[in-house]
């Protein structure tokens, strides 16, 4: 189906006995900018590597625009991928890499690549191995964008950028994507950045999907309630904290009427992600305790 860019069905990847990703079922609609979040080791890079076909699943499957990436090399032209450590041929200059990119990719936009690097004042004639970490990240991102992919997978693309470059990069990404309709999946720990630009959210914790869906629907479906401790609560409690007298709850709510003793507040993306991660963490700790 063309309106679904990435579809995972019970997708799993294991290293020896340990699952890096398990039972991952999700659909990322085309044209979205999806945030992939979760703590270190949650399985974010594994999911991205499976989606680009660099890893083979041990269970289930992932499809990109309906095709299985590992079996379908033609699909690679439609996928741009920047790995976490932005690997580049270190002895090559930016100009070499642009020439290389243009030879390998039919749709490669040489002018865009040159312009972007010039704007960033990254010299085209310098070996990329001698550029700073942030500059190398920008070169890798530029090459991926210039490929004009239908799906762009970015593994922590802004981690090594300074705050201004980060903001500029994310703005450029949003602008470029809005024009071209590219679907972007971007993993990051920087929730405030993600809140500004992403309209789809995937939360991973210890190899499992905790939450996935359009950001606006997820924010709409949750709220923070503040009220007297012990009062009955409407909705499913995801996260709670208490003082002697007062409770603060993050709840998934339906159409229930909130009793008047509760004050209702909207939820931010950061509140939502942290609540689900903390909740999952508590659930896992209890499971481990029971298993011990
Ligand atoms: N090549 C490998 N061999 C063995 N275990 C691996 C390998 N690659 C990943 N793992 C394990 O799989 C799990 C998921 O790793 P992954 O790199 O996908 O996490 P991540 O969410 O991207 O983490 P981070 O935020 O630190 O980048 C981790 O427990 C990791 O140790």
Image: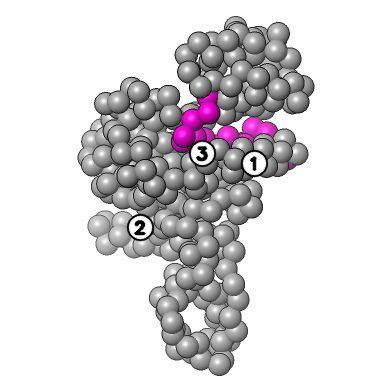
Dot 2 corresponds to which residue?
284
Dot 1 corresponds to which residue?
175
Using the image as rendered, state which of residue 172 and residue 291 is in the foreground. Answer: 172
x then y, percent, for residue 211: 41, 58
Using the image as rendered, state which of residue 63 and residue 228 is in the foreground. Answer: 63
Could you tell me how far apart the alpha carbons at marks 3 and 1 are, in whole angstroms? 11 Å
Quick one: SS at disc 2? helix
x then y, percent, for residue 134: 67, 27
Highlighted magenta segment, given as a residue range: 147-163
Residue 139, placed above or below residue 91: below
On whether ligand 1 comes within 8 Å of the CB at mark 1, the answer is no
Residue 172, placed above or below residue 196: above
Dot label at residue 182: 3
Which mark is nearer the camera, 3 or 2?
Answer: 3
- At 26% across and 56% down in the image, what residue appears? 292
Using the image as rendered, state which of residue 22 and residue 40 is in the foreground. Answer: 22
Q: Is residue 47 visible?
A: yes
Earlier along the polypeptide chain: callout 3 or callout 1?
1
Could you tell me how far apart the alpha carbons at marks 2 and 1 are, in whole angstroms? 40 Å
């Amino acid at each position: 189906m063309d309106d679904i860019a990435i579809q995972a069905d019970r997708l799993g990847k294991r290293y020896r006995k340990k699952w890096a990703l398990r039972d991952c079922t999700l659909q990322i609609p085309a044209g979205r900018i999806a945030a992939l979040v979760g703590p270190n080791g949650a399985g974010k890079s594994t999911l991205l590597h499976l989606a680009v076909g660099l890893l083979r699943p041990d269970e289930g499957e992932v499809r990109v625009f309906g095709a299985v990436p590992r079996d379908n090399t033609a699909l690679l032209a439609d996928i741009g991928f920047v790995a976490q450590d932005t690997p580049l041929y270190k002895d090559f200059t930016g100009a070499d890499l642009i020439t290389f990119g243009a030879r390998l990719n039919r749709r490669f936009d040489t002018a865009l690549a040159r312009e972007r690097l010039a704007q960033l004042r990254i010299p085209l004639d310098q070996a990329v191995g001698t550029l700073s970490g942030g500059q190398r990240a920008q070169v890798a991102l530029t090459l991926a964008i210039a490929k004009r992919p239908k799906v762009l997978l970015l593994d922590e693309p802004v981690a090594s950028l300074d705050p201004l470059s980060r903001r500029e990069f994310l703005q450029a990404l949003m602008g470029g994507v809005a024009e071209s309709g590219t679907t972007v999946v971007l993993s990051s720990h920087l929730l405030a950045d993600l809140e500004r630009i992403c309209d789809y959210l995937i939360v991973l914790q210890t190899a499992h999907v905790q939450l996935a869906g359009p950001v606006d629907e997820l924010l709409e479906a949750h709220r923070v309630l503040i009220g007297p401790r012990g009062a009955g609560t409407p909705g499913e409690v995801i996260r709670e904290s208490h003082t002697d007298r007062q409770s603060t709850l993050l709840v998934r709510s339906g159409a229930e009427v909130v009793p008047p003793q509760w004050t209702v507040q909207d939820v931010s993306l950061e509140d939502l992600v942290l609540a689900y991660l903390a909740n999952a963490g508590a659930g896992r700790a209890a499971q481990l305790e029971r298993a011990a």
